[in-house]
Image (tube, helix red, strand yellow):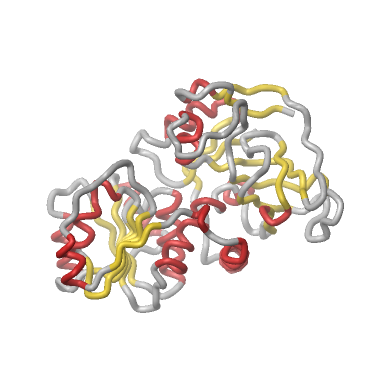
Amino acid sequence: MKAIRVQDFGEPEVMRLDEVPDPKPGAGEALVRIEAAGVNPVESYLRSGTYAIKPSLPFTPGSDGAGVVESVGPGVTEFKPGDRVYVAGSITGTYAEKALCRVEQVHPLPKNVSFAQGAAIGVPYGTAWRALVDRAAARAGETVLVHGATGGVGIAAVQIARARGLHVFGTGGSEQGREMARREGAHRVFDHHAPDYRGQLMDATGDRGVDIVLEMLANVNLGYDLAMLARSGRVVVIGSRGPVEINPRDAMARDAAILGMILGNASASEMRGIHRALVAGLENGTLRPVIGEEIPLEDAPRAHRRLFEGDTFGKIVLVP
């Protein structure tokens, strides 16, 4: 089979298409023929060697994907060959024509969801659900601000928040992206390039502030987030690219909480609950992954460059 391989850490061009042996599923494993693979920022950090954990070289990137079960190992009764599935995690990597997965990493893909959409579920929707529901303990009627509401995690958060009865604000850098966020359920979307957008947002809350902030770039926004919170508000830090200085008095005055999270910290039982909820949302149509760009598998370096070009919206997926 063909797979992207990283032989050395470095720039996107270190990813090259290569021929590798087909994996064979062992006990409790399934082999999935990948029809689409999701591209996530963490994979660019792993590829460059700048992530806290460095995989052993060579390796195939990718944890998210969707396709059809090709074969299963001994003891697997949950799936059979021919089943449509999405995967959230993989043993061998999803930037490939086939991926070997533990059975708990495989989830049913409803018929109303495309393979490209299935590849957009694992990290983005899992992260958004854990941040909003499990960490922030969001309640119907609360107000949430989703920074970066036009990306994969942001769109997922908007849809989940709206489905759970929250009042949803978002930010986006382009009119096209902001329109998409409104279409996906945000009540109001603000241009984060506008110098007065924080004032506009506070005006929209009647100067009360928001109950929850989902923060994708804490090194830029965290100090401002604390000043925009309502009493007992929570900021969930989903992403950051460096340190930040804050005024603790902003948190003190509001009885506020700063909550960190990464999806990898979720327990096995928590992950089972998250994906049961996500599958239900996919089935009833409240969760609808938005695909921004489909790129051929051999062009994986271009996909990684596109992640940080600033004019993307929706999810980038690779198609073998």
Vertical side of 316 occupied by 207: above or below: below
Q: Quadrant of the C terminus?
A: top right
How many marks the image carries: the answer is 0
Q: Is residue 257 left or right of residue 114?
A: left
Give the image location of residue 219, x and y in percent.
27, 46
- Horizontally, residue 118 falls left or right of residue 79, namely left
Question: Where is the N terminus found, in terms of image quarters?
Answer: top right
In which quarter of the view is residue 141 placed?
Answer: bottom left
Question: Considering depth in this image, is 63 or 157 the residue closer to the camera?
Answer: 63
Q: Quadrant of residue 154?
A: bottom left
Q: Residue 72: x, y in percent?
A: 82, 49
Q: Residue at x 45, y 49 (%)?
A: 152
> In the image, what residue occupies the spot 78% across and 32% down?
22
Place of residue 201 in the rendered image (x, y in percent of width and height, measured from the top left): 20, 62
Closer to the camera, 23 or 68? 23
The residue positioned 35% from the left and 60% from the top of the image is 236
Q: Residue at x 21, y 62 (%)?
A: 226
Classify 190 as above or below 212: above
Going by the image, does 158 lie left or right of 34? left
